[in-house]
Amino acid sequence: MFRILVVEDDKNTRLLMRAVLEAERYSVFTAQDGMEALKVMGVEHIDLVVLDVMMPRMDGYEFTKTLRSVQNELPILMVSAKQLPADKKQGFLAGTDDFMTKPVDEEEMLLRIRALLRRAKIASERKIVIGNVTIDYDSLSVTRNGETQVLPQKEFLLLCKLLSYPGKIFTRIQLMDEIWGADTDTGWETVTVHIGRLRKRFDGWPEFEIESVRGLGYKAVKKI
């Protein structure tokens, strides 16, 4: 059972979030501010934090910076009544993984939590498993039914990026910035070439497929 810490100074909101999460069979802990949250984390194992921004003593930004300063990569979903792009930017610069604005849509919050927990599991295990396919970060390899292929680094990173977010569309520019870096002199056509190589490698595999989305970019589709 995943253990979630809700950090929220408003009592009614805190109780509502707890009820919603417990209905989904999460084990829920609560805190009224960042200082209290740190105390909870000192005695309890926590898998994810749902974090308000505006709180007394230690706000959400400071709490997040404190965790990241000691290399704690715990997934954080920041929730705030602030809706300006600058506020979201401040949250991401502090180190949050995701950001929602209030009033919170309960179903969307649950979907975001599931996605964060899934990605955290991939990151901690450094593997993606899809049916008979295992994609191993440490060896840059893809194994299926006992047969292993070691991929060139850029191909491997591109494949991992797409399969870590199945169904999500990435533009060529996004993939270029993520894999090659924003300062690269390489043109976006390189992404197309690498996608072609990946398709050729995994042509006919029933577990997944890389699809083109006309006028937008690419997405990975899990088929099992």
Image: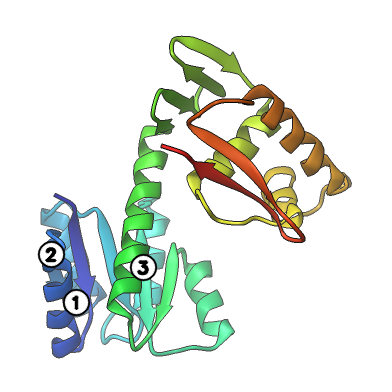
- The residue that mark 3 highlights is 77
Marks 1 and 2, how far apart at CA: 9 Å
Q: Residues within 10 Å of mark 3 (few under 14, many from 20)?
A: many
Counting the numbered discs, the total is 3
Which comes sooner in the sequence, label 2 or label 3? 2
Rendering quarter of residue 195: top right
Residue 75 as seen in the image, left or right of residue 150: left
Q: Return the x and y of residue 26 as percentages of the image width and height.
A: 15, 59
Q: Nearer the viewer, residue 180 or 110?
A: 110
Answer above or below: position of 64 versus 217. Answer: below
Q: Position of residue 82 (x, y in %)?
A: 44, 89
Asked if labels 2 and 1 touch by Cβ distance under 8 angstroms, the answer is: yes
Provide the secondary structure element on which disc 1 rests: helix
Quarter-wise, where is residue 78 in the image? bottom left
According to the picture, the residue beneath numbered tag 2 turns out to be: 28
Side of 183 where 94 appears, left or right = left
Residue that carries the numbered disc 1 in the rendered image: 17
